[in-house]
Image: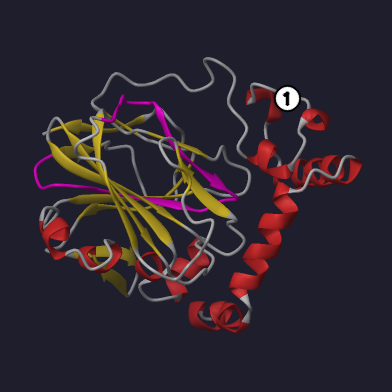
Amino acid sequence: MSNRLSVLPQYLLPKKALTIFAGHVAGAKAGRVTTGLIRWFVGKYKVNMAEAANPDIASYASFNEFFTRALRSGARPLASDPYICPVDGAISQFGAINKDQIFQAKGHSYSTTALLAGDHALAAQFENGSFATVYLSPRDYHRIHMPCDGRLMQMIYVPGALFSVNPTTARGVPNLFARNERVVCVFEGAAGPFVLVLVGATIVGSMQTAWHGVVNAARSGAIRVWQYDRQHLSLKKGEEMGRFLLGSTVVMLFPKNTLSFNPEWAAARPVQLGQTMGTAV
């Protein structure tokens, strides 16, 4: 079956309704029902609870509490290199941005301008730069950390579709990451600006950041922008910057001549928070 045909049902599903319903279920505190759901999920997806700060499944009051669980101390040591992987997941794609085009999958690219909500000035800063896209599967740790030190400058909420972001969908849905709901976080680092884009998906109940909380609770359908350039809000490499309430994808953008990617990186390779992503150019 072709990738296009395999994703056809997603065009027909009531994705927003399913996502709202999943958000309600994930936030419910239903005692034994909640514990049973978590136990089923751990078994189905082979979640490694030994890495969790709290491995007791029965102690989580809601599925969201379990899904955004913290890791035990020392579970993810941080590499000393300037740029580290900010999440647990699998590499979807990475490499050079071709002028303004980001490679999504064979036969599919999308523009930095589209990803960044039509902000041409912001997108221009990443022309011929570098990108990395990491997919978080259901079994992964779902907190997002900083790939390097950065000062928060701006956050943009971009409404959009809610397609799945798994590899099959990435191969079958054009402009996937630039058409799904997303939160664009713009930072200033030692080598210039960089961006982390938190991409929503089907049944991703919400996305939240460390400085704002839940960003997309209302889903009003309008782009929203928050400016932080006067607040001096800085985060260190490895510090938590956000969370997914159910899984999704992170897209990172860096300017030209900023970093050289880890030579061990390859598409579809599993990666972990704290591992070397790249060195400074």
Q: Quadrant of the C terminus?
A: top left
| Membership of 254 in magenta stretch | yes
Return the x and y of residue 42 as percentages of the image width and height.
Answer: 75, 41
Q: Quadrant of residue 105?
A: bottom left
Q: Is residue 184 left or right of residue 42?
A: left
In front here: 217 or 50? 217
- Considering every residue shown, the one lying at the far right of the view is 32
At 14% from the left and 65% from the top, the residue drawn is 120
Q: Quadrant of residue 15?
A: bottom right
Q: Is residue 51 left or right of residue 87?
A: right
- Considering every residue shown, the one lying at the far top of the view is 74
Residue 1 seen anywhere in this rendered image of the structure: no
Query: Is 160 situated above or below 131?
Result: below
Q: Is residue 84 left or right of residue 130?
A: right
Q: Amino acid at mark 1?
A: Pro
Return the x and y of residue 76 as percentages of the image width and height.
Answer: 48, 23
Colouring style: secondary structure
Q: Which contiguous range is marked in magenta?
A: 233-258
At 18% from the left and 58% from the top, the residue drawn is 97
| Membership of 225 in magenta stretch | no
In front here: 69 or 76? 69
Q: Which residue is mark 1?
A: 55
Return the x and y of residue 34 as percentages of the image width and height.
Answer: 82, 44
